[in-house]
Amino acid sequence: MNEDSQLPPLNNGLMPYEPTLFGRGNLQVCRRGKKGNILIVSLHRPRVRNAFKYNLYLDLIDVLHLCAPSDSTVAAIVLTGTGSYFSSGADLKSDLATALDEAQNSLLGRQMLHKPAGRFMMALIDFPKILAAAVQGPAVGIGCTLLMHCDLVYMSSQATLWAPFTRLALVPELCSSQTFLRSMGLSKANELLLLGKQIDAQTALQWNIASQVFDHRELNTNEPFHPQSLAMKMANEIDDRLLSVPCGDRTVDYFVALVKGRRRQEMASICREELLKLDERFNSGQVMEAAQEVRFGSSARNEKAPRSKL
């Protein structure tokens, strides 16, 4: 764990909490709630639309580990993004060459399970507290698939979801081969996964990915800690309806354990299987072949999709 990976301390309500950079500088964090026990975590790489990269995965792993059961000062995490994007997915521009080089030069191949991305996926599945997502803008690739592991998902009306894995000869990730299927049924899941179609927030609501959609004109969608941001609306809702009720901050752990506890082992097994299949795709060289042929963005064939990494 990085030496700068520390949660902001409680101040007992003596002064307002201010956002701070966390760990390696890829996240901004800030406490919210009457007891300061809600941690808003913002993906903070706005220049690259909050694309996931090596150090961002590591910072997220550190946050999840620090907020584990041993820390009683955090009852819930609200994950959001800085700027107009929630996340543009994996930063393939910088990661693909490294990934293919590893696959070609290692006798064991890619071994994605042991890389920061794989370790983050397993930490996310195992997280024992409330994990919520305030999706204020487009969510692509892993920014989309992680939502299926969140206890609550709120979306701005201008947010979109896109999982274009087939365009790069990849495979479903973070258990999406099963979470999408169980949430929306086989045919709709394949609209997202197999055909790689982009969907809007209202469709995400109808397909059971999100629980609420808010009019983006009534939100500040660029500043995650603004009083009118989607993340703040979600934090206030969790605080007022759950953590402020008698013993709510202690009750929540029982609910999360009962709702998600029984499926953790199954999800971890599915995630490992998907990562092994992803290793096969990288090791075959077909991912690099596809990446060299595919163009992302508004010029992509037959798809009005966000300009994105993955």
Image: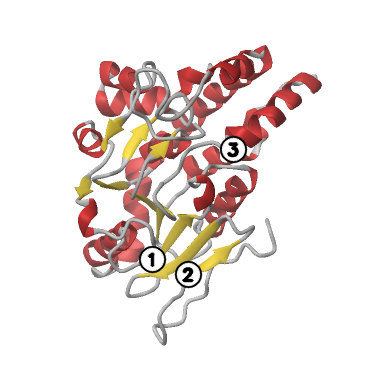
Q: Residue at x 76, y 21 (%)?
A: 108
Q: Is residue 188 above or below residue 88?
A: above
Name the one closer to the observer, 125 or 280: 280
Q: Which residue is mark 3?
A: 117
Crowd band around label 2 with a 10 angstrom C-alpha radius: few (<14), some (14–19), many (20+): some
| Secondary structure category for the residue under label 2 | loop
Question: Which amino acid type corresponds to the residue marked 1 in the rendered image?
Answer: Phe
Q: Is residue 214 left or right of residue 106?
A: left
Q: Is residue 94 left or right of residue 151?
A: right
Q: Is residue 279 above or below residue 24?
A: above
Q: CA distance from mark 3 to mark 2?
A: 25 Å
Nearer the N terminus, badge 1 or badge 2? Answer: 2
Residue 255, horizontal then vertical, whole percent: 31, 51
Q: Which residue is mark 1?
A: 225
Nearer the N terminus, badge 3 or badge 1? Answer: 3
Q: Which residue is mark 2?
A: 19
